[in-house]
Amino acid sequence: MLSLIQRVTSASVTVDGDTVGAIGPGLLALVGVEPGDGDAQVERMTARLLGYRVFADEQGRMNRSLADSAGGLLLVSQFTLAADTRSGMRPGFSTAATPDEAERIFDKLLANCRENHPPGVETGRFGAHMVVSLVNDGPVTFLLKA
């Protein structure tokens, strides 16, 4: 499982012109599910998303997590994140989980994050063509692997 996280001042997802998820300050996480991902990866990624220290403390150092800052979390499924880009000029998708498997795992991650992050977790719509808007704060962007 991969998550490309970006610290944001705001982020939103629209589908067919309707906003389906939006947050203020917090994290946008684009999530790619790989074959074989399961409960262990869901638990690890939940802990990393909520606990990764990317927010400034009183001294301006990245010492505070999303849980510490009580910011929002916007989870967006993105199968292209798990693409194989090592050769050629076109991505291969054999390294991404099948849509059914990915949706099942993504839904577990979403439920786990919602259970463990009371300030709120928003999401897009799995499998839909989504338009993601964000204001990257910093910019601060990290690729997390579980």
Image: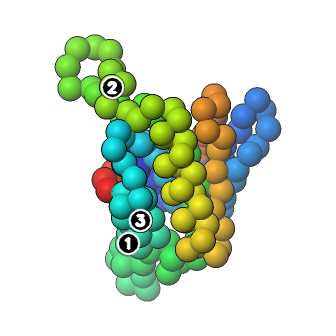
Quadrant the C terminus occupies = bottom left
Distance of label 3 from label 2 (alpha carbons): 24 Å
- Residue named by callout 3: 43
Q: Earlier in the sequence, mark 1 or mark 2?
A: 1
- Dot 3, how many residues are within 10 Å of its Cα: few (below 14), some (14-19), or many (20+)? some
Q: Secondary structure at mark 2?
A: loop
Query: Which residue is painted at 20% across and 19% down in the image?
Result: 87
Mark 3: amino acid: Glu
Reply above or below: 79 against 115. Answer: above
Instruction: Give x and y (percent) for residue 84.
Output: 28, 28
Instruction: Give x and y (percent) for residue 29.
Output: 49, 52
- Residue named by callout 1: 53
The mark found on residue 92 in the picture is none
Q: Earlier in the sequence, mark 3 or mark 2?
A: 3
Reply above or below: 127 against 9. Answer: above
- Viewer-closest of 68 and 128: 128
Mark 1: amino acid: Arg
Please report contact status of discs 3 and 1: CB closer than 8 Å, yes or no: no
Distance of label 3 from label 1 (alpha carbons): 17 Å
The mark found on residue 94 in the picture is 2
- Specify the farthest residue to the right: 18
Instruction: Give x and y (percent) for residue 34.
Output: 36, 40
